[in-house]
């Protein structure tokens, strides 16, 4: 295992040190492994909190900041944070206007965030609403999930709902918006190689040199099928077609995320994006906004995913609103 | 070779398609493989042009936009663009105020940019000045270089001099500033793994599972030595100490870039940055600004590099100025 780490069991702890010193706008509670904005939540603003296993950076800590999250709880690599972390983040980030939990649909995350919401509400009376993202069309149930997995839409949702929270919208309105965004998005991913969880020290799965995994999960969990290695054009088809078969993306502007899994060069991601956009255009999808790069990763896995969000003028306006986080930044 | 590509010999051509459709603020001349800003250079503004082999994305095409470059010439992977490309970019981007060529110190790039400057000047009378970056302290001469290699400082220079160009400073002033920035910066890199040039189809070099290469070049060219794999803390020392031994970074604010080579997860880059900043503080270096991520890459190489720039109030002001490019964006 070749990694830029000290101790395989201390990777998250050590990385949080770097995140804090690299970003003066953020503050890290090292004991509870929570990343906050430097400034407390503005009174009257609903706090947005997410979190999950580490190894998907910039998700979630890299999306803490103006226009997106107020706090993110970091679990061990590919492991849910604990309810304690989420309770602490919820109490601390609440300014009195309530807290929205943004939860990717993995059994551990869902269970722990539910427990945390109950605890925080009963202990301090903070109002908590939750949205669970489940945009991955690849598989219905999986190793870590009942129902579909939450992947790329989470990034888009945190941006869009984060902008609405800055406008001062209330908790119920934001929860409704979040539910609508999740319902309007679909994703599909693929891997050329496995990743290595530091504490495991070996590849999560074996993938022969002449094969790829279509429908991969962001923890390396199995997808739909293994197929012979193909060119970018065919890979793009294998990702986009299941998305378009699952939801109607015509007749409305779309936001498209071509996401790298972490180990694929940006040169290849741009190449893939060209292929994806070509298919979308041929399919009658109008691409209004796009994002190409590493936004929800799986450590050093080589591969990519495609996320489509069916938008409208309101969602595009919220997408375009200023954001200032380590992972997404514009307009400020 | 597992890559998200169609044809190993058409990677740059295909990626340029994706870059253009992903970024409406950019325009691509596909025939000449030049990335421009969508809007022509403002009259009176000096045009900044860079370029080099592809495979280092976001460098250079990802730094075209307000506050940085006006155009970037893309060569084949790890291969200099031709003088023809540079002449075309120089003529097209010039608004009458002259053109600054920003050239990384590799034999092919330097020779071709020199030839292009002469041709452009003699053909159309455009005034051209050049700066050659050579910040890599690892080796004096190498496979592709007489003198030191140009690496991470190139990114910082394009940002700082780009901001000065937006202010309307003239060509001589900008060339002088660029020379000063290059002289104030030092870098050192390392690799855990090789990368694979698509047209070659096999790793550029072999690196055993228990070794790493300290002082690696961004094309995989040899560094100072191969040593047994070590922890992040020791790697940080092996990168920072040669930099501090080569130049005095105390008594002035420093801009620090912790750069990923392309294949290392962001989680590890943050971890490395924590180690680097600790050493800098202990060495009396005041970190004023920092940047952590993939900014000048070597395809999917795992590893990282450290760049330090000795700054002052003027350089920090130019660093903080608004920038809007695919690779660096803030304030706008």
Image (cartoon, coloured by chain):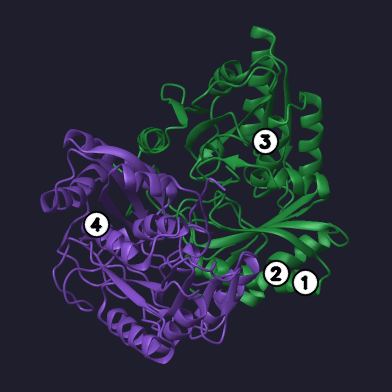
Chain colours: A green, B purple
Using the image, determine if residue A77 lies above or below residue B243: above
Is residue B190 visible to the viewer in this orientation of the structure? no
Spatial separation of the CA atoms under disc 3 and disc 2: 27 Å
- The disc placed on residue A162 is 3
Secondary structure at numbered mark 1: helix
Indicate the position of residue A194 as horizontal and vertical percent values: 48, 58
Of A23 and A113, nearer the camera is A23
Give the residue displayed 75% in from the left and 46% down from the top: A317
Q: Nearer the viewer, mark 1 or mark 4?
A: 4
Residue positioned most to the left: B245
B133 left or right of B5 in image: left
Few, some or many C-alpha atoms within 10 Å of disc 2 (few <14, some 14-19, many ≥20)? Answer: many
Spatial separation of the CA atoms under disc 3 and disc 1: 29 Å
Within the image, what quadrant is residue A199 found in?
top left
Indicate the position of residue A128 as horizontal and vertical percent values: 71, 20
Secondary structure at numbered mark 2: helix
Q: Nearer the viewer, mark 3 or mark 2?
A: 3
Q: Earlier in the sequence, mark 3 or mark 1?
A: 3
Give the residue displayed 53% in from the left and 51% down from the top: A297
Callout 4: chain: B
State yes or no: discs 2 and 1 in contact (Cβ < 8 Å): yes
Q: Which residue is mark 1?
A: A281
- The disc placed on residue A170 is none
Give the residue displayed 58% in from the left and 69% down from the top: B19
Indicate the position of residue B295 as horizontal and vertical percent values: 41, 58
Secondary structure at numbered mark 4: strand
Q: Which residue is mark 2?
A: A277
Q: Nearer the viewer, mark 2 or mark 4?
A: 4
């Amino acid at each position: 295992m070749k990694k830029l780490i000290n101790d395989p069991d201390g990777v998250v702890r050590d990385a949080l040190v770097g995140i804090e010193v690299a970003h003066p706008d953020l503050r890290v509670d090292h004991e509870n492994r929570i990343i906050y904005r430097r400034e407390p939540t503005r009174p009257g603003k609903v706090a947005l909190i997410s979190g999950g296993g580490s190894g998907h950076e910039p998700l979630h800590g890299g999306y803490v900041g103006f226009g997106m999250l107020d706090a993110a709880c970091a679990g061990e690599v590919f492991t849910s944070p604990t309810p304690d972390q989420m309770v602490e983040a919820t109490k601390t980030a609440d300014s009195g206007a309530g807290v929205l939990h943004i939860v990717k649909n993995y059994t551990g995350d869902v269970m722990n965030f539910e427990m945390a919401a109950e605890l925080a509400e009963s202990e301090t009376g903070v109002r908590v609403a939750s949205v669970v993202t489940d945009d991955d069309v690849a598989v219905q149930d999986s190793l870590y999930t009942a129902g579909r997995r939450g992947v790329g839409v989470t990034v888009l949702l945190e941006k869009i709902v984060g902008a609405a929270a800055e406008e001062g919208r209330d908790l119920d309105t934001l929860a409704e918006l979040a539910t609508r965004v999740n319902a309007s998005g679909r994703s599909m991913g693929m891997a050329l190689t496995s990743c290595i969880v530091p504490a495991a020290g070996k590849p999560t799965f074996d993938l022969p040199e002449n094969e790829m995994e279509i429908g991969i999960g962001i923890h390396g969990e199995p997808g739909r099928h293994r197929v012979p290695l193909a060119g970018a054009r065919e890979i793009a088809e294998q990702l986009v077609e299941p998305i378009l078969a699952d939801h109607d993306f015509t007749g409305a502007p779309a936001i498209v995320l071509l996401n790298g899994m972490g180990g694929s060069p940006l040169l290849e991601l741009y190449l893939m994006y060209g292929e994806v956009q070509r298919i979308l255009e041929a399919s009658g999808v109008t691409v209004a906004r796009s994002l190409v790069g590493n936004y929800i990763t799986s450590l050093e896995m080589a591969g990519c995913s495609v996320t489509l969000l069916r938008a409208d003028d309101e969602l595009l306006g919220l997408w375009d609103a200023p954001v200032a986080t380590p992972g997404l930044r514009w307009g400020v």
